[in-house]
Image (tube, rainbow, N blue to C red):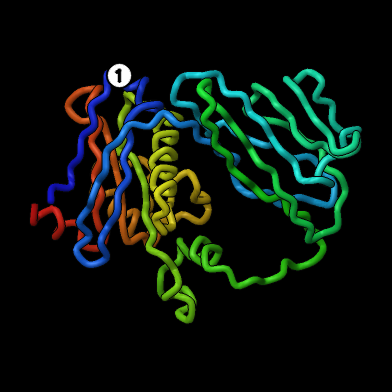
Amino acid sequence: MNNNYRIKHSKISTIIPLLFATFSLTDIQAQTDMFIFGSSRPVAEAGRDIKTLSKGSIFLDGSRSYIGDGSKIKYQWLFAPGLALESDNDFRSEISSETYGGKFLKSVSTYKPVLDVKLAENAPGTKLEVILRIKDRIGFEDTDTLVVEYYDPSKPPEIVADTLSIVQDTLAFGLNQIDTSINDEIPPRLLIQELVDKRISDVDAQIINSMIKDQIRSLGFDYIILLTKDLNKRERPKNYKVDCKTELCVSKNGQLINAQYALTWDFADAEDLLSMRAFKTQNYSETFNML
């Protein structure tokens, strides 16, 4: 099967709300099945979970959310009871806000992609959810959830056996340092990285990467999906290249962070032609020599 896939677009500027692809990879042959479809559904992205002191302020960032029909995004943030006091926050300039009995914030609707929220005091170890909801003009909506966890910096963190955390913490050090007792439970890792193209801004490239990640997640594929921007600079392997110009470069990056698979894309031949390739990183050369 040919691993090159092209999706035609009228302009680069329209890539965000238009066609994207999802795929699956077989474990043995690493051949790729790509399903191409149009999608204008809204996608909410609330950002990562947040750890905070017993009382402080957090920034909720929904800027990676998007609506395919071009609507102006209205961000509705929904708060768990006890997270934020109404008296500590003034959201009168926003579209609307609601409370639980006039004491704790229940929700805030705003056109601002980033919202500054002052937190109520809670005991260390408390975990409270924040939900982001966005809706398009037709009425389709999407939600995303993050968790705010309170902690005490004077106390050492509790060590919890968590597969994903172990993978993320050892990306820069090599597969042989991952606890083999849980290794069989770790799902395959996939690196998504664009090839450098001066016609596309870094922001747009990251949005496209996030959209591809969201589409894969929406079909329920159990991959640990890695984006370059999610890798802490201090934890990146020494030879990891942020600006790749070839599939081989992306493949080597994938091997450095122990990603079994990689997906890369660029605009080939013309501005309106998008090309995506997915492959197994360890035998990249063998896979493409067979095509």
Q: Indicate whether 110 appears above or below 117.
A: above
Residue at the far front in the pictured view: 139
Q: Identify the residue shown where x is 69% and y is 35%.
A: 77
Residue 56: x and y in percent read 82, 43
Q: Residue 202 vs residue 290: left or right? A: right
Counting every numbered tag in the picture gives 1
Q: Residues within 10 Å of mark 1 (few under 14, many from 20)?
A: few
**Which residue occupies the foreground of this view, 64 or 110?**
110
Q: Residue 61 vs residue 78: left or right? A: left
Q: Indicate whether 276 appears above or below 201.
A: below
- Disc 1 marks which amino acid? Lys
Residue 236: x and y in percent read 46, 54
**Which residue occupies the foreground of this view, 261 or 143?**
143
The local secondary structure at tag 1 comes to: loop
Tell me the quarter of the picture where residue 157 sits. Answer: bottom right
Q: Identify the residue shown where x is 43% and y is 51%.
A: 226
Residue 124: x and y in percent read 82, 59
Q: Indicate whether 229 appears above or below 181.
A: above
Q: Identify the residue shown where x is 25% and y is 22%.
A: 271
Residue at the far left in the pictured view: 290
Q: Indicate whether 251 appears above or below 99.
A: below
Q: Residue 159 vs residue 269: left or right? A: right
Report the residue marked by disc 1. Answer: 11
